[in-house]
Amino acid sequence: MAAPWQVTRLLHGVRAIVGGQGPPLVLIPGWPQTAEAFSDLFEPLSKNYQFFALDPPGLGESTPPSNGYDTANVSKIMAEAIHDIVKEQPYHLIGHDVGGWISYPWAVQFQSRIKSLSILDASVPGFLPPFQFPLSNQTNLRLWQFSFNALPELPEILTTGRERELLSWFFNLKTVHKDGLRDDHFERYIQAYSRPGAMSRGFEYYRAFETSSKQNLEFAKTPLHVPVLALGGASSVGSGMVDLVRNFATNVSGGAIEDCGHFLPEEQPSAVATKLLEFLEANSKE
């Protein structure tokens, strides 16, 4: 980790990488990643913002939640950890993948604290289109983990001791280029998810997906009015992210990041940083 960034522990045992100066900005990665997923964005973001890149509860090195992995609960835990640090300051919220699942209920429950929300290539629970079975091969390749990870016991039986093989296959499948992830990022994820119980804690987010979906559909009865940027990788969700987010938010912009799969902050950090900084600047007034 570069010297300017500090690794610290927040309230509720939430691990954070912190750096920069300015208005606060929260970064939430997905599964199977850690806060380091955003490290190629730290430098450009730090010039105008103080960023907090967080490991979600139970992922990376953050303490597991004591009362469930549903995203309404997890987002409250993370919000309390951030509010303990930033006090009354409003802040920007950015989530990718499972981090996007978490960021929506976070924003809707604490809307008065949020300057803006950015969701990067995330199938937010409750808002996926209906699918007919059997799934097409293309859809199955993109969404297989939603079914597999949610099964009881079987994922642990099949993946224990084979975390490197699973994650290698997973990242190669979901990136446009074989070298889409930096080697140090990949090794960090292997280290994090090879720890005893780490894969199970990741699976629990998928096992709580149905509960999170019901929560979100209830939340969506009151639309989110903060500005939302919705970005998808052109070879993944793409501009469909905008349509998905319009299910629960009224002020939505965004589109597709070209030459990119699912892992936007790592596959196309320069393009993502440009889009984020333009959006953040436009929504940074107090």
Image (cartoon, rainbow, N blue to C red):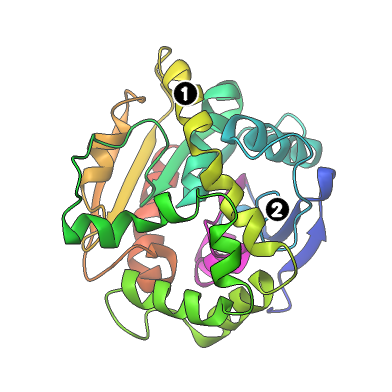
- The one of 229 and 11 positioned closer to us in this rendering: 11
Name the image quarter holding residue 132: top left
- Quadrant assignment, res 175: bottom left
> Is the residue 112 above or below the residue 42 in the image?
above
Of 66 and 220, the residue lying toward us: 66
Q: Give the residue displayed 21% in from the left and 48% down from the top.
A: 239
Q: Distance between the residues labelled 2 and 1?
A: 22 Å
Give the position of the C terminus as an image quadrant: top right
Q: Mark 2 points at which residue?
A: 58
The x, y position of residue 123, in whole percent, is 37, 44
**Residue lying farthest top?**
221
Q: In this view, does 23 lie to the left or right of 270?
A: right
What residue lies at 82% left-to-right and 43% top-to-bottom? Answer: 12
Q: In this view, does 104 lie above or below 4?
A: above
Residue that mark 1 sits on = 214
Residue 272, label in figure: none
Disc on the earlier residue, 2 or 1: 2
Location of residue 209 with respect to 143 vertically, above or below = above
Instruction: Please say whether residue 76 is visible from this viewpoint.
Output: yes
The residue tagged with tag 2: helix, strand or loop? Answer: loop
Q: Does the magenta stretch include residue 235?
A: no
Q: Residue 256 at x, y = what percent?
A: 23, 55
Name the kind of residue labelled 2 in the image. Gly
Residue at (57% x, 46% y) in the render: 205
The magenta-colored residue range is 23-46
In the image, what residue type sits under mark 1?
Lys
Toward the viewer: 145 or 64? 145
